[in-house]
Image: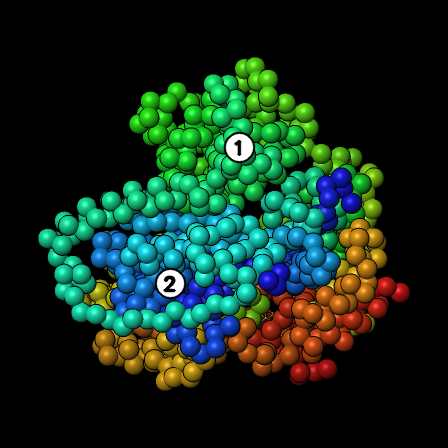
């Protein structure tokens, strides 16, 4: 964690991937610890497949947005979006990234070959950064739903230690904020990630 | 008092409930929508909650409720107030009996809006008090204060969150009226710790033509009253209302005032004036830069707390104004300097330190602070922590790869895609203009559909088409409109077309919901925000009553849809095609994801090039279907020249 008192985390991806729930779950954990929390989420037009980012801050934050260079952890639902948000990461911070690229329809149209590999290579070459690569597709397949990508990435971030929260805390937050119908599937994703 | 994680809009909704609100109306619009939805969600049935047909209807209905002594809340986005401006301007003169609060959410960026208009100007123009919350916690307290002020001064009041307040979450102590960030007026029922709140009891409507009927003579008299009211409220808000305050590194208002007095003639060289979310950006920037400066926080930009601001101006030399959108606080301070013969220098947008467009952020404010602090010799200003040209980001060793742009797109399986494509195919090379409108279907402008030539404002597509068609009679004019937009402000445009003999085709994109703003019900859906099912209004019957020739087709029945457009093209006058198929969020997919037969696919990419469906991707240099995204609408199957795209269930 940075010298600032609380957690600073940015979660980025593509609208529709479950970004908002991910930030609410981290916020829920901090709230359960009686911390003051702020989050900022992208709600609106960009939710239709555009670039979205959620910010979560613990401690006693002023701004709901993490300033550039201050994120302890950057959680990315796909490699290119991690690069788009890289300026938020603090030196020595952690990146948790799903290695499977999400192709924007314009890429195929404009003949841009985008498979995320260049973005991943860039992330791998960043000095002094802890990079956690997650094979999201395989976790989702094992958990039986593409909807658990957000939880799998959160679980990987928890495991990396970058969030300073425990697996039990994450599980409690899911029980608190997610519909019981989806508990089992999400807890399974955490189990798969924690192995 | 329970501490909750609340989104700003939830805090506003709960705050209104805890203020005893009786009547809530509004029209959806990002970033305001969740305020009304929160009230509906927590409604025990005793509050009337409605999505009105548009903002004007919402405000007028709420005004009636407030005339009858109810506490009424109206919610909308900033451009919604343009629609509701007619009733607002007069309501300011007429006033209310019960408290009337209008939540108008501004959207710096803009992130999801047509304009970056600043509602603080609207408040000045309409002479209606405005509260400008800086956080969800302050929003919770302020909306309760707003009801109280509205009732006491018989005026409508605006509460104006911005996106980073509306769509930010914060920890808020709820109930009892005191959120963790700001005190209220000395009002015992609001300050109460025992968590009790009471439903306001409306007095009922009392007839009084002098009061409720607008006439030139009464308006002359009311105009004077409105000005006196604004002056009285400005004085009241200048001292003792905590959201307006002077503070400095942890010192409260009283301590800072004392510090000012102790310094005597020795003024601070630099102070900051700010409001809304920028207040929190400023406090964080000061912390990051290690600066201790007096800060004037403005929570009620209209009526401007001039006495408080004058006290601040007398204690500092230069002032940096930090606010999003228009330089409202900055202009007020410049005005005060002239009015009170003060010699301060005011920095901000007017002298170019900040830009007008877009959001602010902590980093930019740090940069500007560095620049301002660099000006001349400043003993107290030490830019010890911040070197603006060296933001502490991770140093990269390889250059950043070029990233594909990622604009929002119509969902995989969106019926609008099929409707646009049917029109495109039917029109072919004929000269035509496609006048679009506001909603998910605005996204039909993107390649490869490229089916939106104009988009102005809600309801404007149908009418803009009429103007173009008149000037360019050889152009086939299409006006696209969504179902919610049709009810909100499209009907008048159709009436105009029929009456004035225009020649155009209305394309009604009826997806049975208000999709763009998050699938709200509307008059055509038959569901109300009170949870009741009512008879849905029939769009074809409305059009038929207007003598409009009308066809109904399922856009996913591709060939019939194209034929319907062709039939309409062969006619003249005002004719309509209703493309009826639900938004994918309303129903689970009717068919499984489609399958691509790799042997049959010649990789011509016609599907991608013509439809732009996000589920059609290129994988390892070849077309592929992303099954996690495909909704099984089967539109692409009808386009593939080799029938390589097939129904999902067919040949496993
Ligand atoms: C004056 C005004 N009020 C509200 C909005 C917010 N808004 C954007 S799109 C939309 C309605 C879209 O519904 P519909 O016409 O049914 O199209 P859909 O999104 O379902 O395709 C609304 C209310 C706005 N942009 N302008
Ligand atoms: S939300 Fe509904 S209407 Fe909007 S793009 Fe998606 S499918 Fe289409
Ligand atoms: S069937 Fe074809 S057009 Fe429809 S959602 Fe699936 S891939 Fe997209």
Residue B647 quadrant:
bottom right
Q: Residue furthest right?
A: A195
Q: Position of residue A97 (x, y in %)?
A: 76, 54
Does residue B51 sit above or below B113 in this rendering?
below
Q: Which residue is mark 2?
A: B74
Residue B256 image label: 1
Q: Nearer the viewer, residue B557 or B141?
A: B141
Chain holding disc 1: B
- Residue B138 appears in the picture as rendered: yes
Do callouts 1 and 2 mark residues in contact (Cβ within 8 Å)?
A: no
Q: Secondary structure at mark 2?
A: strand
Q: Does any portion of residue B330 appear in the rendered image?
A: no
**Which image quadrant for residue B378?**
top right
Q: Which quarter of the image is occupied by the C terminus of chain B?
A: bottom right
Residue B398 position, x and y percent, is 76, 36
Q: Quadrant of the N terminus of chain B?
A: bottom right
Give the quarter of the image for residue A46: bottom right
Please say if B490 is above or below B80.
Answer: below
Q: Chain of mark 2?
A: B
The residue drawn where x is 54% and y is 66% is B195
Task: Name the N-terminal-most of marks 1 and 2.
Answer: 2
Distance of mark 1 from mark 2, alpha carbons?
Answer: 38 Å
Q: Residue at x 38, y 84 (%)?
A: B534
């Amino acid at each position: 964690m940075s010298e600032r008192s609380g957690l600073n985390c940015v979660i980025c991806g593509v609208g529709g991937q479950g970004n908002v729930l991910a930030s609410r779950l981290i916020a829920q954990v901090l709230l359960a610890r009686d911390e003051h929390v702020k989050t900022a989420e992208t709600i609106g037009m960009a939710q239709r497949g555009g670039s979205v980012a959620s910010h979560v801050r613990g401690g006693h934050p002023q701004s709901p947005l993490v300033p550039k260079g201050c994120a302890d952890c950057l959680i990315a639902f796909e490699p290119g979006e991690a690069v788009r948000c890289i300026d938020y990461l603090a030196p020595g911070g952690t990146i948790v990234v799903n290695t499977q690229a999400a192709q924007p329809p314009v890429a195929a149209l404009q003949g841009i070959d985008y498979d995320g590999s260049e973005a991943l290579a860039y992330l791998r070459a960043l000095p002094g950064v802890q990079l956690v690569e997650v094979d999201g597709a395989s976790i989702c397949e094992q958990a039986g739903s593409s909807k658990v990508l957000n939880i799998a990435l959160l679980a990987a971030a928890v495991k990396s230690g970058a969030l300073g929260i425990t697996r039990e805390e994450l599980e409690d937050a899911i029980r608190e904020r997610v519909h019981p119908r989806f508990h089992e599937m999400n807890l399974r994703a955490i189990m798969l990630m924690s192995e | 008092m329970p501490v909750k994680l609340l989104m700003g809009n939830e805090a506003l909704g709960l705050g209104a409930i805890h203020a005893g609100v009786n009547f809530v109306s509004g029209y959806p619009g990002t970033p305001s929508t969740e305020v009304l939805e929160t009230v509906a969600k927590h409604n025990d049935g005793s509050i009337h909650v409605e999505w009105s047909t548009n903002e004007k209807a919402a405000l007028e209905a709420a005004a009636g409720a407030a005339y009858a002594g109810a506490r009424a809340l109206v919610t909308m986005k900033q451009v919604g107030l343009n629609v509701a401006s007619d009733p607002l301007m007069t309501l300011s003169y007429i006033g209310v009996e019960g408290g009337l609060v209008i939540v108008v959410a501004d959207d710096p960026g803009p992130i999801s809006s047509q304009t970056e208009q600043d509602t603080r100007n609207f408040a000045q123009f309409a002479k209606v008090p405005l509260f400008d919350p800086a956080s969800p916690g302050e929003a919770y307290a302020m909306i309760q204060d707003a009801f109280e002020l509205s009732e006491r001064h018989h005026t409508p009041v605006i509460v104006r969150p911005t996106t980073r307040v509306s769509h930010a979450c914060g920890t808020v102590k709820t109930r009892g009226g005191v959120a963790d960030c700001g005190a209220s007026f000395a009002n015992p029922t609001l300050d109460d710790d025992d968590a009790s709140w009471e439903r306001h009891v409306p007095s009922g409507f009392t007839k009084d033509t002098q009061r409720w009927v607008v006439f030139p003579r009464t308006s002359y008299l009311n105009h004077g009253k409105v000005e006196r009211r604004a002056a009285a409220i400005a004085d009241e808000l200048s001292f003792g209302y905590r959201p307006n305050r002077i503070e400095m590194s942890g010192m409260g208002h009283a301590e800072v005032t004392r510090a000012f007095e102790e310094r005597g003639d020795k003024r601070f060289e630099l102070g900051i004036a700010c409001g809304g979310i920028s207040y929190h950006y400023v406090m964080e920037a000061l912390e990051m830069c290690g600066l201790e400066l007096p800060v004037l926080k403005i929570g009620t930009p209209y009526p401007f707390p001039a006495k408080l601001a004058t006290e601040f101006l007398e204690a500092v030399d230069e002032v940096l104004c930090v606010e999003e959108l228009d330089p409202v606080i900055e202009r007020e301070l410049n005005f005060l300097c002239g009015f009170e013969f003060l010699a301060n220098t005011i920095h901000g947008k007017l002298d170019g330190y900040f830009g007008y467009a877009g959001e602010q952020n902590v980093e930019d404010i740090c940069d500007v602070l560095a620049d301002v602090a660099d000006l001349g010799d400043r003993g107290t200003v030490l830019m010890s922590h911040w070197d603006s040209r060296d933001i502490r980001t991770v140093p990269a060793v390889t250059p950043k790869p070029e990233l594909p742009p990622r604009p929002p797109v119509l969902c995989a399986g969106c019926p609008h895609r099929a409707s646009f494509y049917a029109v495109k195919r039917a029109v072919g090379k004929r000269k035509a203009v496609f006048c679009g409108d506001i909603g998910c279907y605005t996204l039909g402008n993107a390649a490869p559909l490229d089916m939106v030539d104009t988009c102005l404002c809600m309801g404007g597509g149908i009418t803009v088409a009429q103007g173009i068609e008149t000037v360019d009679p050889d152009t086939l004019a299409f006006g696209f409109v969504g179902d919610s937009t049709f009810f909100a402000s499209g009907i008048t445009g159709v009436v105009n077309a029929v009456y004035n003999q225009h020649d155009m085709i209305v394309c009604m994109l009826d997806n049975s919901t208000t999709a763009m703003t998050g699938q709200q019900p509307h008059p055509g859906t038959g569901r109300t925000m009170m949870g009741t099912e009512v008879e849905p209004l029939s769009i074809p019957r409305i059009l038929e009553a207007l003598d409009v020739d009308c066809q109904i087709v399922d856009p996913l029945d591709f060939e019939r849809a194209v034929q319907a457009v062709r039939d309409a093209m062969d006619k003249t006058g005002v004719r309509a095609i209703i493309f009826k198929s639900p938004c994918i969020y309303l129903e689970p997919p009717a068919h499984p994801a489609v399958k691509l037969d790799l042997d049959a696919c010649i990789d011509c990419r016609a599907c991608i090039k013509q439809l732009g469906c996000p589920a059609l991707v290129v994988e390892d240099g070849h077309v592929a279907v992303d099954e996690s995204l495909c909704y099984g609408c089967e539109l692409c199957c009808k386009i593939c020249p080799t029938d390589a795209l097939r129904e999902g269930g067919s040949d496993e």
